[in-house]
Image: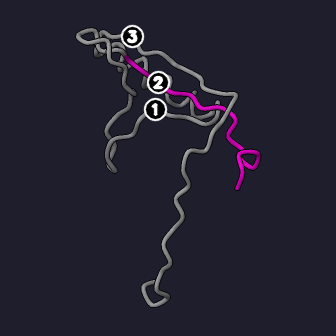
Amino acid sequence: MTVRDLKIDACWLFVCTDPKDNNEGLVGMMTEEGWAPFVAADQRMVGKFKPHAQGIADASGLEVRLIKFGGAVEVLETYTPAPRDSEVL
């Protein structure tokens, strides 16, 4: 697969800045499966995260920003699945 084959042409992140040290981090929440950062590849998911991001801003007193990344894409590494033993499946 090449970069031209990717259907994702933008990525949205919800981020917050820690006022103590100015470090930025992803905003997210705990789910039954564990930590889920608010990262979206389409507007539908951005819309689903917005109310949660506002709730986090209200609860923490910190500003949550929605940032969009798009344009140039560089695939840094590709991880392929290891061969599986047919009996394991």
Picture quarter with the N terminus: bottom right
Q: Which residues are magenta?
A: 1-16
Label 3, label 2: how far apart the Cα atoms are: 10 Å
Kind of residue at disc 3: Glu
Q: Residue at x 39, y 40 (%)?
A: 36
Query: Quadrant location of residue 29?
Result: top left
Q: Which mark is residue 63?
A: 3
Total numbered labels: 3
In the picture, measured across the screen, residue 53 lies left or right of residue 62, that is right
Q: Residue at x 45, y 90 (%)?
A: 87
Whether the magenta-drawn stretch holds residue 30 is answered as no
Q: Is there a contact, CB below 8 Å, between mark 2 and mark 1?
A: yes
Label 2, label 1: how far apart the Cα atoms are: 6 Å
Q: Which residue is mark 2?
A: 14
Query: Quadrant location of residue 26?
Result: top left
In the picture, measured across the screen, residue 30 lies left or right of residue 74, that is left
Going from the N terminus, do you reach mark 3 or mark 2 first? 2
Whether the magenta-drawn stretch holds residue 7 is answered as yes
Instruction: Answer few, some or many: residues within 10 Å of disc 1's Cα (few below 14, many 20 plus, some between 14 and 19).
Output: many
Q: Which residue is mark 1?
A: 38
- Residue 19's x, y, as percent? 28, 9
